[in-house]
Image (spheres, grey):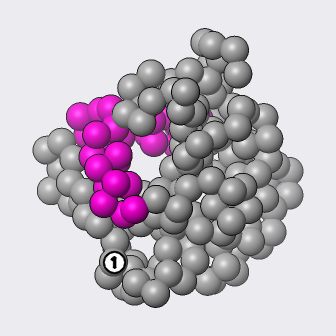
């Protein structure tokens, strides 16, 4: 059975962060099977061009709480240019050994290779990049994710969880 996850990180004013993960058993993310959150008390400072140095330890913390995954979706870019310069997704893929799809909400000037996916009644696209999976397949997965809005339901849910707007639900199946 396929296990897929979506992850997000939110930083607080005290120099820490909360990382969140939602896990599903199918690529449409139509039924969230489990949710996890990890509070990180101290994070590295933001360095332009090196977001992964700040975000990857947080992602690893929350992934350690859940089951092994076959695919992960991150909020941001997997690769930053057509030559494959690694972004957060590629660094994450390298660190955890699975394919990663990057879903960004705004364009990045060098990411001319990103696939544009427009969902629901939105007029603005999402920018899809990937590592370890073909970009056209990644775009198809994001386009088919549950939800009627621009942002797929699972990504909106993991964002709310990372922001602390709600607590994780208990897993509905053994993980």
Mark 1 lies on residue: 113
Asked if the magenta segment contains residue 165, the reply would be: no
Helix, strand or loop at disc 1? Answer: loop
Query: Where is residue 163 shown, x and y percent of the image?
Result: 60, 42
Asked if the magenta segment contains residue 144, the reply would be: yes
The vertical placement of 149 against 48, above or below, is above
Query: Where is residue 72 shown, x and y percent of the image?
Result: 56, 48
Q: Residue at x 25, y 64 (%)?
A: 116
The vertical placement of 94 against 101, above or below, is below
* Quadrant where the image shows the N terminus: top right
Query: Where is residue 152 shown, x and y percent of the image?
Result: 35, 40
Q: Residues within 10 Å of mark 1 (few under 14, many from 20)?
A: some
Query: Where is residue 167 shown, x and y percent of the image?
Result: 65, 25
* Horizontal arrangement in the rendering, residue 69 relative to residue 73 (left or right): right
* Quadrant where the image shows the C terminus: top right
**Residue 28 position by quadrant:** top left
Which stretch appears magenta?
134-161
Q: Residue furthest front?
A: 1
The vertical placement of 87 against 35, above or below, is below
* Horizontal arrangement in the rendering, residue 9 relative to residue 61 (left or right): left
Residue 138 shows up from this direction: yes
Q: Residue at x 56, y 73 (%)?
A: 87
The vertical placement of 72 against 108, above or below, is above
Q: Nearer the viewer, residue 118 or 18?
A: 118
Q: Residue at x 60, y 12 (%)?
A: 172
């Amino acid at each position: 059975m396929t296990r897929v996850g979506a992850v997000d990180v939110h930083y607080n004013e005290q120099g820490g962060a909360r990382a969140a993960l939602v896990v599903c058993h199918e690529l449409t993310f139509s039924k969230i099977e489990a949710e996890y959150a990890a509070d990180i008390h101290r994070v590295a400072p933001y360095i332009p061009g090196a977001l992964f140095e700040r975000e990857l330890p947080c992602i690893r913390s929350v992934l350690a709480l859940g089951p092994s995954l076959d695919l992960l979706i991150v909020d941001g870019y997997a690769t930053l240019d057509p030559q494959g310069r690694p972004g957060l997704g590629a660094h994450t893929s390298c660190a955890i050994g699975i394919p990663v799809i990057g879903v960004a909400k705004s364009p990045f000037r060098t990411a001319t290779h990103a696939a544009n996916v427009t969902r629901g009644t939105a007029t603005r696209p999402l920018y899809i990049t990937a590592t370890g999976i073909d970009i056209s397949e990644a775009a198809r997965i994001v386009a088919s994710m549950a939800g009627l809005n621009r942002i797929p339901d699972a990504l909106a849910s993991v964002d709310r969880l990372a922001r602390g707007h709600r607590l994780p639900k208990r897993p509905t199946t053994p993980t």
